Amino acid sequence: MAKSGSLKSTLAVSLNNYLDAGAIVAGASGVTLWQNYLGLSEMHLGWLNALSANALGAAIGAIIGGFLADKFGRKFIFTYNLLVYMTGVLIIMLSMNFPMLLAGFLITGISVGIGVPASWTYISESSEVNNRGRNICISQMSWGVGPMFILLFGMLFAPGGYLYGPVEAIAHDIMGADAAQAAVEVFSSRVVFATLFVVAFIAWNLQRQLEESAEFTANKEKDQSSIVDNIKLLFTNKIAVKTVAFLAAIYLTWNLVASVMGFFMPHIYETAGGLSNETANMLSCISWVFVVVTTFIISFFVDKVAHRFFYVFGLAAALTAWILIIGGGVSTIAGIWVFTILWGVNNGSSVQVFYALWGSELFPAKFRAGAQGLMFFIVRGLSAVWGLVFTFIYGDNGEGFTLAAYCMVALLLASLVVGLIGMPNTRGKSLDQITKERYGENI
């Protein structure tokens, strides 16, 4: 595929990352409005989080979607999956009760999970040898742009926001002038989800026009293994098992920290920094700007400079940010800005970039997407469990804040050490060359 072709397909497929992160942030930003509208308890909110794109919904979808992509093709996923996503988002937009809302969150989450392994696999297989890292970085940028825009939309459309007036007017036109205030206010969340529906529709139209991955096509011509055969091979091949263990370890330890930052960042800004909720949300949005900028800069060098440098750079920024918290360095405006920048830089040069890159490089084509789906299932599933454990460590009123921070530092150090020990040397090599070096000729 020509250079321009790989960039075009990368941009089309990367919209899945926008929709993934966007669904998570849209759910989080509007959850209080839905709670007020439907009278939801904390248990209801726990179910919404557990079955969403941030946890079990995506985990279930990933393990299904990965093996489907290996059996029926990457294009098969792109042709149908976003129809599922749009269905889930539409149910959320039209929700009138908790079962509808929960079903929408679950369907959207499953679709997100189905799309992730196919997306990263397709990007790698469609890239040139010297642009594979760049294209994965572009995909990562989309993961940062999603929350950035959804947070911005959330602030603009929220009650008191600059664009709440038109939202309120639409709500009254639909429900009448005497509609309950909570029912009117939740329309701001419905509108935010509507923006995701529009992006998903655009992405679906772009992705269903893509050609099938040449590597998948070539592999299917010589190999007719069933899904069960590929699963058995994945679990019995020693190299594959070791690779799953390595990648799951570095991604899980980093993701356990990243997955709770949506909860932690506003707390840090509001309590340690003494900022208002509106200002805290604005700084969270700014943090995503640094994610995008950092990843954009790295994309020019990731295929030319040793991966070890950027891997250490990102984790060093994350560790410094959390050490700053433990030392009380976020009690000043300057400290808050340093923390915001460091966490943004970490996400821009994050473990997720290299997990996506190595995960799509270190497995043969026959179970490349399936292996990524399995790892994504493990990581998102355990992240859901960690979310429950974390609340016990943290405490009802933040009394376990310092202990939680030390846990974060330990997890980030584990990701750094394991990554440095098991880091592969794949830069400048074709996927076929990497496969033959690791698995031999007959895999």
Image (cartoon, rainbow, N blue to C red):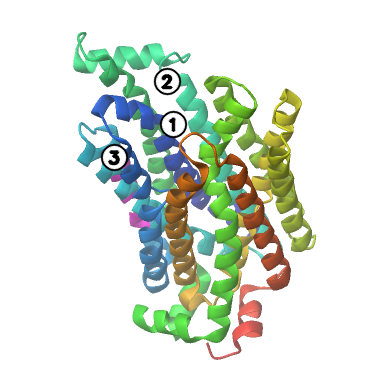
For the residue carrying disc 2, how many other residues have a C-alpha within 10 Å: few (<14), some (14-19), or many (20+)?
A: many
What's the CA distance linking mark 2 and mark 3?
Answer: 22 Å
Q: Earlier in the sequence, mark 3 or mark 1?
A: 1
Q: Earlier in the sequence, mark 2 or mark 3?
A: 3
Secondary structure, magenta segment, majority class = helix
Q: Position of residue 222 (x, y in %)?
A: 45, 85
Q: Earlier in the sequence, mark 2 or mark 1?
A: 1
Q: Do tag 2 and tag 1 residues touch (Cβ < 8 Å)?
A: yes
Residue indicated by mark 3: 44
Q: Position of residue 103 (x, y in %)?
A: 25, 45
Q: Residue at x 56, y 19 (%)?
A: 276
Looking at the rendered structure, the secondary structure element under dot 3 is helix
Question: What residue is disc 1 on?
Answer: 29
Q: Which image quadrant is residue 201 in?
A: top left
User: Mark 3, residues whose alpha carbon is within 10 Å: few (<14), some, or many (≥20)?
Assistant: some
Helix, strand or loop status at disc 2:
loop
Q: Is residue 73 visible?
A: yes
Q: Mark 3: which amino acid?
A: His
Taking the magenta stretch, the answer to whether it contains residue 305 is: no
Which residue is at the front of the view, 432 or 5? 432
Q: Kindly report which numbered mark, 2 or 3, lies closer to the viewer in this rendering.
A: 3
How many angstroms separate mark 3 from mark 1 (CA)?
A: 16 Å
Q: Residue at x 42, y 20 (%)?
A: 158
Residue 415 image-quadrant placement: bottom right
Tell me which segment is drawn in magenta. Answer: 79-89
Q: Where is residue 17 drawn, in percent x and y?
A: 50, 48
Q: Is residue 208 visible to us here?
A: no
The residue that label 2 is drawn on is 158
